[in-house]
């Protein structure tokens, strides 16, 4: 992720949300809030409209929701906390497919 790029944060309010936001600001990146109350359609619209290249998610459910209909602009994802090997592989496969 480069300077001035838009990064989505798809999480409920928690300490890691604020830490992620502050880290983005310190590297001159723009944070875009993706609230899980909006649902997958609205979240994917926001990702496309804001041209978000990376999304940070709270849990596996949110990541799978985003990856089910991944907008072409999305290149990377990062889950807060531990990630299973299967989830990492699925994420890489779906994001790699978009780049081809």
Image (cartoon, helix red, strand yellow):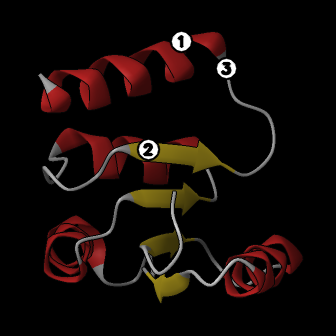
Q: Is residue 56 above or below residue 93?
A: below
Location of residue 21 with respect to 84 vertically, above or below: below
| Distance of label 2 from label 3 (alpha carbons) | 16 Å
Residue 58 position, x and y percent, is: 64, 59
Task: Kindly identify which numbered label has been placed on residue 86.
Answer: 1
**Mark 3 and 1 residues: CB-CB less than 8 Å, in contact?**
yes
- Residue 27 lies, with reference to residue 62, above or below; the image says below
Please state if 90 lies on the left or on the right of 13 as rendered: left
Disc 2 is placed on an element classified as: strand
Q: Earlier in the sequence, mark 2 or mark 3?
A: 2
Measure how far apart labels 3 and 1 are at the Cα level. Answer: 5 Å
| Residue matched to label 2 | 76
Residue 83, placed above or below residue 58:
above
Residue ranking furthest to the front: 3
Q: Earlier in the sequence, mark 1 or mark 2?
A: 2
Q: Residue at x 15, y 54 (%)?
A: 71
Instruction: Determine whether the residue tagged by mark 1 lies in a helix, strand or loop.
Output: helix
Residue count near mark 2 (Cα–Cα under 10 Å), binned few <14, some 14–19, many ≥20: some
Q: CA distance from mark 1 to mark 2?
A: 16 Å
Expressed as whole percent of the image width and height from the top left, the position of residue 19 reads 84, 77
Q: Residue at x 40, y 83 (%)?
A: 37
Q: Which residue was labeled with disc 3?
A: 84
Q: Nearer the viewer, residue 41 or 92?
A: 92
Q: How far across and down, in percent of the image, does residue 5 sit?
A: 43, 74
Callout in the foreground (1, 2): 2
Q: Going by the image, does 9 lie left or right of 13?
A: left
Observer-nearest residue: 25 or 3?
Answer: 3
């Amino acid at each position: 992720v480069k300077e001035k790029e838009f990064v989505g944060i798809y999480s409920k309010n928690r300490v890691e949300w604020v830490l992620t936001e502050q880290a983005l600001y310190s590297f001159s990146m723009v944070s875009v809030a993706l609230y899980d109350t909006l649902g997958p359609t609205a979240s994917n619209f926001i990702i496309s409209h804001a041209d978000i290249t990376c999304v940070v998610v709270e849990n596996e459910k949110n990541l799978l929701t985003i990856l089910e209909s991944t907008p072409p602009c999305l290149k990377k994802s990062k889950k807060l906390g531990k990630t299973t090997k299967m989830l990492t592989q699925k994420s890489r496969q779906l994001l790699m497919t978009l780049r081809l």
